[in-house]
Image: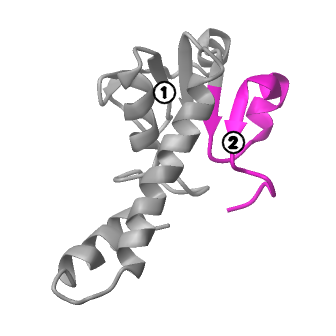
Amino acid sequence: CLPKDTKQLLANYEDVPQNLIEAIVNSNATRKEHIAQMIINRNPNVVGVYRLTMKANSDNFRASAIQGVMKRIKAKGIEVVIYEPTLKEDKFFNSKVIDNLEEFKSICDVIIANRVTSDLENIIDKIYTRDLFKRD
């Protein structure tokens, strides 16, 4: 739910009595915690993040929700690796970036994917996703 925008709204209207925006900010944090815990419960050694972007055909992953999920998983001592073809660096927030999709799929016990693409169909049992309808 637009985490960056709701946090900014909360800051802009900090002197206005309200609790809707704060509830949205808190809800987003709760959702990240829930997703991280669902993945941690699978007892993985390596968790992969398939694409950092939140929408198809986008290269914008500043403040994407996946970063909060990654932080929570890494706090439990679980290795997190990333497959993001738009990244040219070999690390992202101290997580290894893997540019070979087959290598990425083979080393991950669980893969978090915002959307399930045909690239992932052969490892569907490893996928954790919210992509119920296969669309943005």
Can residue 115 be found in the magenta stretch? yes
- Residue at the spot of label 2: 129
Q: Which residues are magenta?
A: 111-136
| Mark pair 2, 1: CA separation | 15 Å
Dot 1: element: strand
Quadrant assignment, res 96:
top left
Q: Quadrant of residue 40?
A: top right
Q: Is residue 51 left or right of residue 126?
A: left
User: Does 50 sit above or below residue 7?
Assistant: above
Mark 2 / mark 1, whichever is N-terminal: 1
For label 1, the residue is 82
- Foreground of the two, 47 or 31: 31
**Contact, CB < 8 Å: mark 2 with mark 1?**
no
Q: Position of residue 55 (x, y in %)?
A: 57, 57
Residue 105 included in the magenta stretch of the image: no
Location of residue 111 in the rendering, given as x and y in whole percent from the top left corner: 63, 27
Quadrant of the snapshot with the C terminus: bottom right
Image position of 39 (left or right of 118): left
Callout 1, which amino acid? Ile
**Circle 2: residue type:** Thr
**Residue under the image location 22 percent in, 84 percent down:** 13
Say which residue appears at 34% left-offset and 53% top-offset. 62
Asked if 34 appears above or below 5 in the picture, the reply is: above
For label 1, the crowd category at 10 Å Cα-Cα, with few meaning under 14, some 14 to 19 and many 20 or more, is many
Q: Is residue 106 above or below residue 33?
A: above
